[in-house]
Structure formats: C-alpha cells, structure tokens
Amino acid sequence: MTDIDADTDTDPAPDTDPGINTTEPGACCGCQELDRAEATARAERDASKVSDCRVLRVRHRVAEHGERS
C-alpha cells in the first residue's frame, strides 16, 4: 500500500509569494485582511465600517487584480 499524501506537495515554490498580485482574489493577503476587517465591523454592528470595507475591497481588486469596478 502506498502513501498518497507523500506524493502530493501543497507548498508553493520558494520563489513565489501567493499573497502578491495573484489572479485569485481569495488567496490575496490584502483581500483576506479586508474580509477580516469587514467581519469584525459586522460583529461590532458598525454599518459604516462595513460599507468602508466593501469600497476598499473593490478599489483593491481593481488596482491589484485588474478587475473592473
């Protein structure tokens, strides 16, 4: 019987940083930070801050991921 887990390598190559200029917004550190900030604002019931986070996320995605607004 072979060990399937030993054959798979999930670590990124040492010369790549998955958190910078990735085409997948979910993997971006900036996107993740904005998601956490929005979740915190929701928990605090701060609607203004939730809205701010959404605006910042759209701006970030346009600037960093080339998405259209």
Image (cartoon, helix red, strand yellow):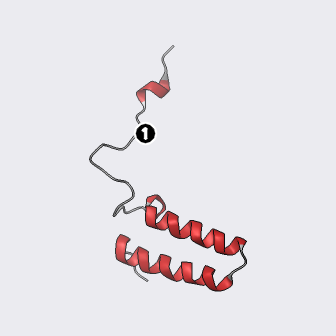
Location of residue 9 with respect to 28 vertically, above or below: above
Q: Picture coordinates of residue 5 (x, y %)?
A: 49, 27
Could you say which quadrant of the image residue 21 lies in? Answer: bottom left
Q: Picture coordinates of residue 68 (x, y %)?
A: 40, 80
Q: Picture coordinates of residue 18 (x, y %)?
A: 37, 54
Residue at horizontal 71%, vertical 74%?
Answer: 44
Residue 69 versus residue 29: which sits nearer the camera? 29
Farthest top residue?
Answer: 1
Could you say which quadrant of the image residue 39 lies in? Answer: bottom right
Residue at horizontal 43%, vertical 39%?
Answer: 10
Compared across the picture, whether 2 is left or right of 62 comes to: right
**Mark 1, residues whose alpha carbon is within 10 Å: few (<14), some, or many (≥20)?**
few
Residue at horizontal 36%, vertical 77%?
Answer: 63
Could you say which quadrant of the image residue 35 lies in? Answer: bottom right
Compared across the picture, whether 21 is left or right of 46 comes to: left
Look at the numbered disc 1 and give the secondary structure of its residue.
loop
Residue at horizontal 36%, vertical 72%?
Answer: 64
Farthest left residue?
Answer: 15
- Name the residue tied to disc 1: 10
Which amino acid does the dot numbered 1 rest on? Answer: Thr
Compared across the picture, whether 67 is left or right of 3 comes to: left
